[in-house]
């Protein structure tokens, strides 16, 4: 049941563990975005260079200001009217693990619209990291069956929800938003 999976994932996050979970885009690796040791675990699992950024998920756009110094007003419209999942890279990240924040002080945030993720983040009351469930440099998994055994063996908990869903998923659109409201697409 969904509530059982949320509870199990919640316990894993609280203990500094890494979860493999479905999102509004592709299957992801997640952890507490405020716990640097947990973020390090994900980087090791993915064999990912520390300079390559990860994004965080929030359940609600009114929480963005807790993690960004100055949120341009246009961000709320972009999130509200986006037709596809949208990750926005904001400048001036704060209150996150240092290894989540890019060298330039920015962080990618997606306000997730997904039953499992939304409920998990609401209960956790903190942002969670979301990075594709693949080794660095390999293709992103289009569904659960595409997740490699090296990933499934390395995580602390695999969420048993939507594993049978064969919908081919793709990563989110990524947009960089400057404090003045100017934006550019990084990935469409």
Image: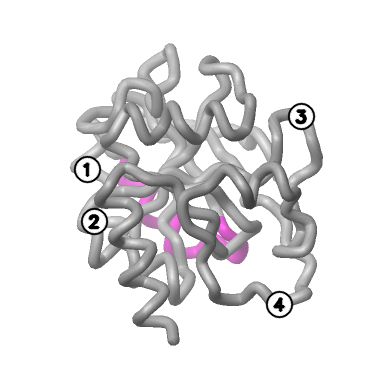
Mark 4 lies on a secondary structure that is loop
Quadrant position of the N terminus in the picture: bottom left
At a point 53% along the width and 28% down the height, the residue shown is: 43
Q: Which residue is mark 1?
A: 65
Residue 31 included in the magenta stretch of the image: no
Image location (x, y in percent) of residue 61:
31, 56
Q: Nearer the viewer, residue 166 or 157?
A: 157
| Mark 3 vs mark 1, CA separation in Å | 32 Å
Instruction: Look at the image and give the residue range highlighted in magenta.
Output: 72-85
Compare residues 4 and 86 and report the one nearer the observer: 4
- The quarter in which the C terminus is drawn is top right
Question: Which numbered marker is on residue 150?
Answer: none
Which one is closest to the eye, mark 3 or mark 2? 3
- Marks 3 and 4, Cα distance to the nearest angstrom? 24 Å
Q: Are marks 1 and 2 in contact (CB under 8 Å)?
A: yes
The residue carrying mark 2 is 62
Q: Position of residue 99 (x, y in %)?
A: 39, 22
Mark 4 vs mark 1, foreground winner is 4
> Cα distance, mark 4 to mark 1?
34 Å
Please determine whether, in this image, residue 126 is positioned above or below residue 180. below
Element under disc 2: helix
Residue 164 shows in the view: yes
Q: Which mark is residue 165?
A: 4
Q: Hey, which quadrant is residue 187 in on the image?
A: top right
Residue under label 3: 137
**The image quarter in which residue 135 lies:** top right
In the rendered image, residue 80 lying in the magenta stretch gets the answer yes
Q: Is the Cβ of the residue at disc 3 closer than 8 Å to that at disc 4?
A: no
């Amino acid at each position: 049941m969904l509530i059982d999976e949320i509870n199990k994932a919640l316990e894993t996050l609280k203990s500094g563990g890494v979860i493999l979970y479905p999102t509004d885009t592709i299957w992801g690796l997640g952890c507490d975005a405020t716990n640097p040791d947990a973020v390090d675990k994900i980087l090791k699992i993915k064999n990912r260079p520390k300079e390559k950024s990860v994004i965080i998920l929030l359940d609600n756009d009114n929480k963005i200001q807790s993690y960004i110094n100055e949120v341009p007003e246009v961000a709320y419209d972009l999130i509200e009217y986006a037709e596809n999942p949208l990750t926005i890279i904001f400048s001036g990240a704060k209150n996150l693990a240092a290894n989540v924040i890019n060298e330039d002080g920015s962080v990618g945030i997606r306000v997730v619209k997904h039953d499992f993720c939304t409920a998990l983040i609401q209960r956790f009351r903190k942002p969670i990291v979301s990075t594709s469930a693949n080794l660095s440099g390999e293709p992103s998994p289009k569904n659960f069956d595409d997740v490699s055994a090296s990933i499934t063996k390395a995580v602390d908990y695999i969420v048993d929800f939507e594993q049978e869903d064969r919908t081919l998923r793709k990563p989110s659109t990524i947009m960089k938003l400057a404090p003045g409201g100017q934006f550019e697409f990084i990935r469409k």
